[in-house]
Image: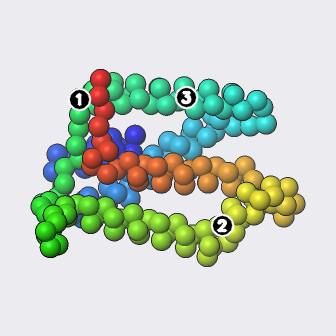
Amino acid sequence: LGAYVALQMLGPTATPASFALVLVAAPLAVAAFGTLLELCMRRTYGRDPLYGLLLTFGAALVIEEVIRAFWGSRERVLPTPEALQGAVVFGDLLFARYRFYAAGAAALAIGALWLFIERTSYGAKIKAGSYDSEMIRALGINLTRLRLGVFALGVALAALADDDREMLRLWA
C-alpha cells in the first residue's frame, strides 16, 4: 500500500525534492490507515489469537483488492528522478545510483528509529510496556494509546520499506 500511495502522490514525473517528500509523506498516510486498522483489531485483544490472525489475513486480502480496483493489476514502477538514474563505477563493478539513495534513506530511517527508541521518553515507555504492561498502567500511562502509536509506527516503517521502486510490482 505504501508504494501505491507513493505512486499516487508522486505522479508521472519526479524531482529529487518531490521524491524525498513522498518518501516521508506516503508512510505517514499509510500510518493513518494502519491506525484505523488497529482500532478494528482491538476487539480481538485478549481473545483467541486466531481472531487477530484471521482479521489480519482478511484485511490483507481487502487491501490487495482495493489496490487492484483503484490502480489496476498491471505492473507499475515509481518514476525515478534523473539525478538518481544511471550508474556509478567502482573498479570493475557498476552500482545503480538509486541503490545508494535507497541505502542512505534506509540508514537514516534506522538511525532515526534507534534515536527515537533509545533517547526519548516515548521510546522508554515502549520498551517498558513491552516488558511489563502492568507497570505502565500503574504509572498512569494509557497503554491502549501507546500500543496504537507503536502499531502506527510499525505500519509507517513497512510503508517506507515498500516505497522502493523495485518493490512496486503487482501481478494479476
Which comes sooner in the sequence, label 1 or label 3?
3
Q: Is residue 9 visible?
A: no
Q: Are marks 2 and 1 in contact (CB under 8 Å)?
A: no
Amino acid under disc 1: Arg
Give x and y (percent) for residue 114: 55, 70
| Location of the C terminus (image quadrant) | top left
Q: Mark 2 = which residue? A: 122
Give x and y (percent) for residue 52: 66, 32
| Location of the N terminus (image quadrant) | top left
Mark 2 residue element: helix
- Direction from residue 96 to residue 114 in the image, left or right: right
- Direction from residue 93 to residue 21 in the image, left or right: right
Q: Mark 3 = which residue? A: 57
Give x and y (percent) for residue 54: 62, 26
Mark 3 residue element: helix
Furthest-front residue in this view = 92
In this rendering, is residue 98 above or below 3?
Answer: below
Which comes sooner in the sequence, label 2 or label 1?
1
The residue at 29%/37% (across/down) is 169
Q: Mark 1 = which residue? A: 74
Alpha carbon separation for disc pair 1 and 3:
23 Å
Amino acid under disc 3: Phe
